[in-house]
Amino acid sequence: MTEELIIEILKDAFYTVFIILLPVLGVSLIVGVFISIFQAATSIQEMTLTFVPKLLATALVIIFLLPWIIDKLVALTTKMFTLFLTIV
């Protein structure tokens, strides 16, 4: 294995993880901003008010995007195995 090959493998893995996590983190960020605005407007400073909705929104996004996430991970795994077979 050369350094270029290792860099390519790591680049593909990090890119795939970034693409998978981007929608999940984006929804969590948007929900957090809306809840923070709501808390600032109503002067409610309850910690569970921020935690529970973000947890539920994140879980719903993961469930909704699960087929797409699995497709991305299977594509990465297939690419890695074919790459490993060409090396050996």
Image (tube, rainbow, N blue to C red):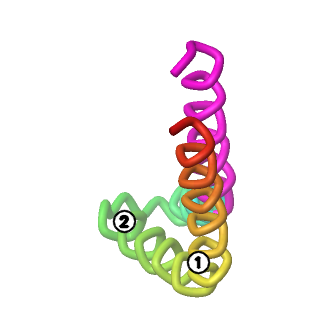
Mark 2: give few (<14), some (14-19) or many (20+) Cα within 10 Å: few
Residue 20 picture location, percent across and down? 62, 59
Q: Residue at x 68, y 53 (%)?
A: 19
Residue 66 appears in the figure: yes
Depth check, front residue: 71 or 45: 71
Task: State whether residue 87 is above or below residue 21.
Answer: above
Mark 2, mark 1: which one is toward the viewer?
A: 1
Residue at (54% x, 54% y) in the render: 81
Circle 1 — which element? helix
The residue pinned by badge 2 equals: 51
65 versus 85 height, above or below: below
Q: Residue at x 57, y 36 (%)?
A: 87
Q: Which residues are magenta?
A: 1-23
Q: Give above or below for 77 relative to 14.
A: below
Q: Which residue is mark 1?
A: 61
**Residue 49 location, x and y as percent?**
39, 70
